[in-house]
Image: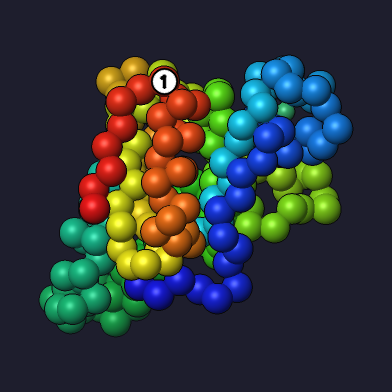
C-alpha cells in the first residue's frame, strides 16, 4: 500500500502536545504532569503517527450478530425470496426484503463508530490513543480511545514499504473484554522506524519486536 501523500511523517517532541485521554492541548504545560481536563498522566515524550486504521475488532457478540444476519440474508436474497412466494405470496416475499433492509439498518446504526479516513495515533506513557486525523473544532465530536499499556500484550511495527509501516496492537487477557485489537498503517520512513520502536519500548516499558 502506498503512503497517502497527504499524511505527515511521524512526529515526536520533547514535550507532550496532546492529551491521549481527551485530546486537550498540552502545549505550554510542564512535563511530567496530569491533564487538567481529564487527569490522564503525560510525560515529556510523545510519538504522533499519522495513518489509517485497518481493523478495529468488534466484540464477539457484534460479530455473531453480523454472521447471523448474513446467514439469513444471503440465501434469502439469492433464492429464498422465490421459495417464500408459494407460501406467503408476493407481498410476503417483499416483507422479507423489508426485514432484510430493516435488520441491516439496525446493525449499521448500532455499530460502533466506524472511524474512517486518516487517524492520528498518539503514543505516550499512559498508552496509545487513536484520534481523528485533524483536530476537531467542535469539542462535542472529540473522540479519544486510549488503550492503556496494561491492556496491551504486544505492539509491533512491521515494514510494509520504505515509507509505510504497520502497527499491530494485540490485547492482553486483561484487555480482551474491550475492543483493543488495533491494526493500523502509518506513514513512516525506514530511518524513523527504528527511533519510533525505541520510543515505544521506552514508553511502554515492555519488550517489543520489530519485524523487518
Ligand atoms: Zn485529558
Closer to the camera in the image, 152 or 33:
33
Q: Circle 1 is placed at which residue position?
A: 205
Furthest residue in direction right, as rendered:
28
**Residue occupying the point 63% across, 57% down:** 133
For ligand 1, which image quadrant applies?
A: top right
Dot 1: element: loop
**Residue occupying the point 61% across, 36% down:** 46
Vertical placement of residue 28 versus 106, above or below:
above
Q: Position of residue 69 (x, y in %)?
A: 28, 56
Coloring scheme used = rainbow
**Residue occupying the point 46% across, 26% down:** 202
Furthest residue in direction front, as rendered:
191
Q: Quick check: can you spot residue 171? A: yes
Q: Quick check: can you spot residue 55? A: no
Q: Position of residue 52 (x, y in %)?
A: 48, 59
Q: Position of residue 70 (x, y in %)?
A: 24, 61
Q: How many marks?
A: 1
Vertical placement of residue 208 versus 135, above or below:
above
Closer to the camera in the image, 76 or 160:
160
As drawn, is 78 to the left or to the right of 189? Answer: left
Closer to the camera in the image, 115 or 196:
196
As drawn, is 7 to the left or to the right of 141? Answer: left
Task: Classify the position of the N terminus by image quarter.
Answer: bottom left
Quarter assignment of residue 78: bottom left
Q: Position of residue 57 (x, y in %)?
A: 35, 45
Closer to the camera in the image, 123 or 98:
123
Label 1 C-beta lies within 8 Å of the nearest ligand 1 atom: no
Mark 1 neighbour class, 10 Å CA radius: few under 14, some 14 to 19, many 20 or more: few
**Residue occupying the point 25% across, 66% down:** 73
As drawn, is 49 to the left or to the right of 87? Answer: right
Amino acid at each position: 500500500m502506498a503512503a497517502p501523500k497527504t499524511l505527515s511523517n511521524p512526529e515526536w517532541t520533547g514535550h507532550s502536545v496532546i492529551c491521549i485521554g481527551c485530546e486537550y492541548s498540552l502545549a505550554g504545560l510542564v512535563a511530567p504532569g496530569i491533564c487538567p481536563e481529564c487527569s490522564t498522566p503525560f510525560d515529556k515524550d510523545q510519538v504522533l503517527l499519522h495513518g489509517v486504521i485497518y481493523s478495529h475488532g468488534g466484540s464477539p457478540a457484534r460479530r455473531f450478530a453480523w454472521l447471523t444476519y448474513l446467514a439469513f440474508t444471503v440465501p434469502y436474497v439469492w433464492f429464498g425470496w422465490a421459495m417464500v412466494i408459494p407460501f406467503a405470496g408476493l407481498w410476503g416475499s417483499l416483507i422479507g426484503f423489508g426485514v432484510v433492509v430493516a435488520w441491516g439498518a439496525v446493525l449499521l446504526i448500532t455499530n460502533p463508530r466506524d472511524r474512517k479516513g486518516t487517524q492520528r495515533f498518539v503514543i505516550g506513557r499512559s498508552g496509545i490513543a487513536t484520534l481523528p486525523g485533524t483536530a476537531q473544532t467542535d469539542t462535542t465530536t472529540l473522540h479519544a480511545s486510549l488503550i492503556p499499556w496494561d491492556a496491551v500484550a504486544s505492539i509491533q511495527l512491521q515494514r510494509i514499504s520504505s515509507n509505510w509501516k504497520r502497527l499491530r496492537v494485540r490485547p492482553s487477557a486483561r484487555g480482551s473484554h474491550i475492543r483493543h485489537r488495533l491494526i493500523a498503517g502509518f506513514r513512516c520512513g525506514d530511518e524513523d522506524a527504528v527511533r519510533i520502536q525505541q520510543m515505544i519500548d521506552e514508553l511502554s516499558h515492555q519488550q517489543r519486536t520489530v519485524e523487518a
